[in-house]
Amino acid sequence: MTMFTDILLLLEKTEPVDQVKSEAIIAIMTLLYQVDGKFRIQEQEAFDRVMEDLPWHDKGISKEAFHRSQITKSLNALEQNSIADYLQEFVPALRSDGKVLALFRNLANADGDLHPKEAEIIRQVATMMV
């Protein structure tokens, strides 16, 4: 089992990961891996493990299609400097779950380097969760 799988299992034990929460996790992870302009293999592997293990209940769109839609939206948020607006759409679904913050930190650190922009997004998410 990987660290990411362990975190997802903890998430499921404390509170089931519903569709809205799964979408929020994917959207914020997408923003996190894009913000530093580099998507290293370690981040890709970590992201893929979470995607594989994350519950998905929407029969109208696949996880992969949802992720593809978020790539464009998160890039637009970065280009337009509207990260807070982007996050505001998704953070409420996280329900102040500290384990999700740990998941984001682990993804951001997966390449061995926590970029200041990644750290800032994690801080923003934590602040919005309060």
Image (cartoon, helix red, strand yellow):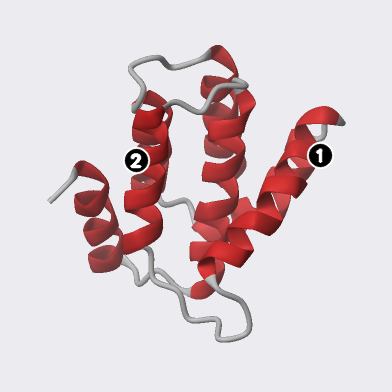
Q: Name the residue: 22% across, 60% down.
A: 9
How far, Cα to Cα, is label 2 from label 1? 24 Å
Instruction: Give the secondary structure at mark 2.
Output: helix
Q: Name the residue: 79% across, 43% down.
A: 85
Q: Is residue 86 left or right of residue 49?
A: right
- Label 1 amino acid? Asn
At which x and y percent is residue 90? 64, 55
**Is 82 above or below relative to 93?**
above
Residue 60, numbered circle: none
Residue 45, numbered circle: 2
Residue 46 shows in the view: yes
- The first of marks 2 and 1 along the sequence is 2
**Is 99 above or below relative to 21?**
above
Q: Name the residue: 55% across, 34% down.
A: 32
Q: Name the residue: 32% across, 51% down.
A: 49
Callout 1 crowding tier (Cα within 10 Å): few <14, some 14–19, many ≥20: some
Instruction: Give the secondary structure at mark 1.
Output: helix
At which x and y percent is residue 3? 20, 42
Residue 76, numbered circle: 1
At which x and y percent is residue 51? 41, 57
